[in-house]
Image (cartoon, grey):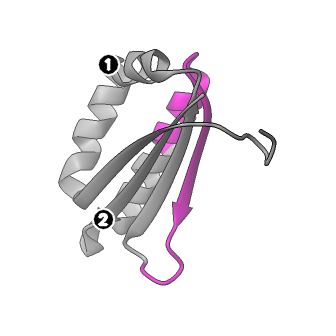
Amino acid sequence: MYVIVEFLEAAPAHVATARAALLMLARQSLEGHHCHQFDVAEDPLEPTGFLVYRLYADEAAWKAHTDTAEHQALMLTLAPWLVSRRLLAYDLISEHGLA
């Protein structure tokens, strides 16, 4: 499995709209055939901070998902509301604590 972790910081004036867009992105991603898990978390100490955790079968599935018109359009919408975005990719070696 292929894991994508993103740390996002929204502009203070756009926290609510960025939050709504991330939740829409999660819904769209899970309705597709490429994404197995899409979790969105808010930072309880810094209201502008979000963490996104996604799980795909492999890197090709992630790339196929990000190449969809819906994903690209939503990311273009979200981009102006963000101050920063850091994306990290991992290969999953243990799921649910099991190796």
Give the image location of residue 4, x and y in percent.
47, 40
Q: Is residue 47 left or right of residue 28?
A: left
| Disc 1 packing (10 Å; few <14; some 14–19; many ≥20) | few
The picture places residue 45, in percent across and down from the top left corner, at 48, 84
Q: Is residue 66 above or below residue 45?
A: above
Q: Which mark is residue 10?
A: 2
- What is the secondary structure assignment of the residue under circle 1? helix
Expressed as whole percent of the image width and height from the top left, the position of residue 78 reads 28, 47
Q: Which mark is residue 7?
A: none
- Please say whether residue 80 is one of the residues in the magenta stretch: no
Residue at 37 percent across and 72 percent down: it is 48
Q: Position of residue 87 (x, y in %)?
A: 34, 47
Q: Is residue 19 left or right of residue 79?
A: right
For the magenta stretch, what is the residue range?
Answer: 24-46
Q: How many marks?
A: 2
Query: Which residue in the rendered view is the most extreme toward the bottom?
Result: 45
Nearer to us in this view, 1 or 22: 1
For residue 37, which quarter of the picture?
A: top right
Q: Earlier in the sequence, mark 1 or mark 2?
A: 2
Q: Residue at x 60, y 28 (%)?
A: 1
Residue where numbered disc 1 is placed: 69
Question: Label 2: how many residues lie within 10 Å, few (<14), some (14-19) or many (20+)?
Answer: many
The secondary element bearing badge 2 is classed as: strand
- Residue 73's place in the image compared with 15, above or below, is above
Amino acid type of the residue that numbered disc 2 sits on in the rendered structure: Ala
Q: Amino acid at mark 1?
A: Ala
Disc 1 versus disc 2: distance between alpha carbons? Answer: 23 Å
Question: 8 or 1, which is in the foreground?
Answer: 1
Tell me the quarter of the image containing the C terminus.
top right
Residue closer to the observer: 5 or 9: 5
